[in-house]
Amino acid sequence: MNKRKIKKILSSRYYLLLLGILFIFFSFAVSLYADDSEKEKPKNPFSYPAIANSEYDVAGEYVYLDLVELYQFAERETSNVTEEYYYAFDKDWYVYIVCITKEDFLTMQSKYEVDPDNFSYRIEGYLFDLPDDVESLAKEMIPEVFGENSSHLVDNFDEYFLSTYLDTINSPYLTSSETIVFVVILLGLGCFFFISGILRILKVGKLKQSKEFTDVVSELERPSTIDFTNISLALTDSFLFNYGLKKFVNYRDINDIYYKSRRIYVIVDNKPINYGKCSDKQFENIKNCIIDRKNMMNTQEVLA
């Protein structure tokens, strides 16, 4: 086993603690930011017609529109909902582009059927810049909505229509549920990395305090070491070392070794100790190697 891998195995990885602290910090930062955003979120909408083409007609503004007629020209599927785009007319027959749900439209339709002569419906939402794809679809529907002699509306779209549209579905602000999910994910990751870092430091610290630790490290560098990388286990001349679990045992201390539930168990002082998962074939190779090296150690001790 090369020195670089040995150094990596024995590293305390303090960066895990740092990652944990950063994620926890970000979770609190997002929570505070969301709280501030909630306080800053506009409560009372502006009249869309009143601010049209003014300095307030910008993305992010909260507005309302009292509409009297709708013409759908597009719809777009998202992961959560189907967005429906309409030409909307107010009582003065000024035209706007709005985005609503099918449910909103059905509600309006029901109200219209009750009293079509006095129909008016207020929608509220945020202004967004008109996307190019929606603008293209809006232009395609102009002849159908405004008549065949409306090519000038297509050619001079920016002059006759606003650069924004009213969206009743989406918001530039995170919703409460989205904020909670985001904060929980960040906090969960933070706790995971922090606890993993603490456990890693404790395991490596305990490993380094073992009296035979220096012998294990020196033997790991020998060419005779067999490294089962996929199960994080190594067999040195004298030790069974699971560097994933950060524990080792001297062959001479092993009373027995057996395989159960796809795991290696060694008996030390009449107590079974789990040394990690492996396959049937790997276990046979590990067991045979341990027996051979233990016998070699015993032979060397007798000859000495």
Image: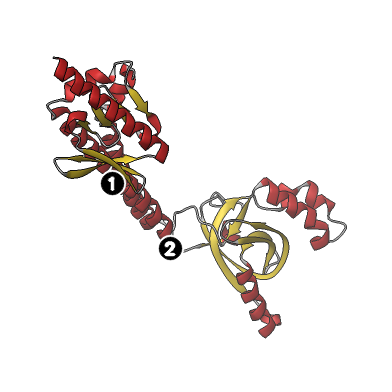
Query: Is residue 19 or residue 237 the one in the foreground?
Result: 237
- Classify the position of the N terminus by image quarter: top left
Asked whether, in this view, residue 96 is left or right of residue 293, the answer is right
Residue type indicated by callout 2: Lys
Badge 1 marks a residue whose secondary structure is helix
What residue lies at 56% left-to-right and 62% top-to-bottom? 168
Q: What residue appears at the point 87 percent right and 58 percent down from the top-left corner?
A: 148
Amino acid at pointer 1? Cys
Res 224 quadrant in image: top left
Q: Residues within 10 Å of mark 2 (few under 14, many from 20)?
A: few
Q: Distance from label 1 to label 2 (Cα)?
A: 36 Å
Q: Residue furthest right?
A: 148
Q: Residue at x 12, y 26 (%)?
A: 211
Tell me the SS state at disc 2. loop
Q: Residue at x 58, y 71 (%)?
A: 122
Q: Which labelled disc corresponds to residue 191? A: 1
The residue pinned by badge 2 equals 43
